[in-house]
Amino acid sequence: MAIKKYVTDASMYTWALLRIALGYVFLWAFLDKLFGLGFATCKAKATGLVDVGCSSAWINGGSPTKGFLGNAATGPFADFYHNLAGQAWVDWLFMLGLLVAGVGLLLGTWIRFASLVGIVMLLLIWSALLWPANVPGVDEHIIYALVLFGVALTSDHQAWSLNAWWAKTKLAKALPFLK
């Protein structure tokens, strides 16, 4: 059965809003970690003061994974994640994942690939934080991953998307997984 049969115009605008919002979340995380804009990066915990571009910013030699994986990871996989913290290849994969998911979802290009990257990242972060504090087994990372699954399923019918244009590009034709 075709998904189009069950999808209304109103629901496609809802999926588009969810896609754009999550794209913004991923892209903002990338920019904050890259430049230290003072939200998760370069903000003093005690005072709340922001030092834009501090030494924790990736562009200034900081590691985007060291703080979270080195300190926040808990549960059965904590040692595994602590050992990954601050490694250059992990930093690069993490930042590339944030950028690919953020741009792809925000612009509505390579939506399925961006959704898959986002889902993998969210599930990895969820597994680093086991067990969730408020609801057994489920936290916002699982909810976001489920939303991205829905976005991927509706990617061909997304509103406010550059997907139709993107699918016609030489790059998308050469690399079908980017459609």
Image: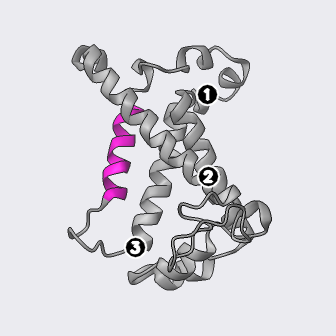
Residue 32 horizontal/vertical position (percent): 61, 56
Q: How far is the residue under mark 1 from the one under mark 3? A: 34 Å
**Which residue, given by chain and number where applicable, does mark 2 sit on?**
30
- Kindly state the secondary structure of the residue where label 2 is placed: helix
Q: Is residue 2 left or right of residue 76?
A: left
Q: Say which residue appears at 26% left-offset and 62% top-offset.
A: 138
Which amino acid type is marked by label 1?
Pro
**Which residue, given by chain and number where applicable, does mark 1 sit on?**
176
Q: Say which residue appears at 46% left-offset and 65% top-offset.
A: 125
Main SS of residues in magenta: helix
Chain part drawn in magenta: 140-153
Q: How far is the residue under mark 1 from the one under mark 2? A: 25 Å
Residue 91 horizontal/vertical position (percent): 68, 64
Decide: is 142 above or below 114.
below
Which amino acid type is marked by label 2?
Phe
Direction bottom: furthest residue: 79
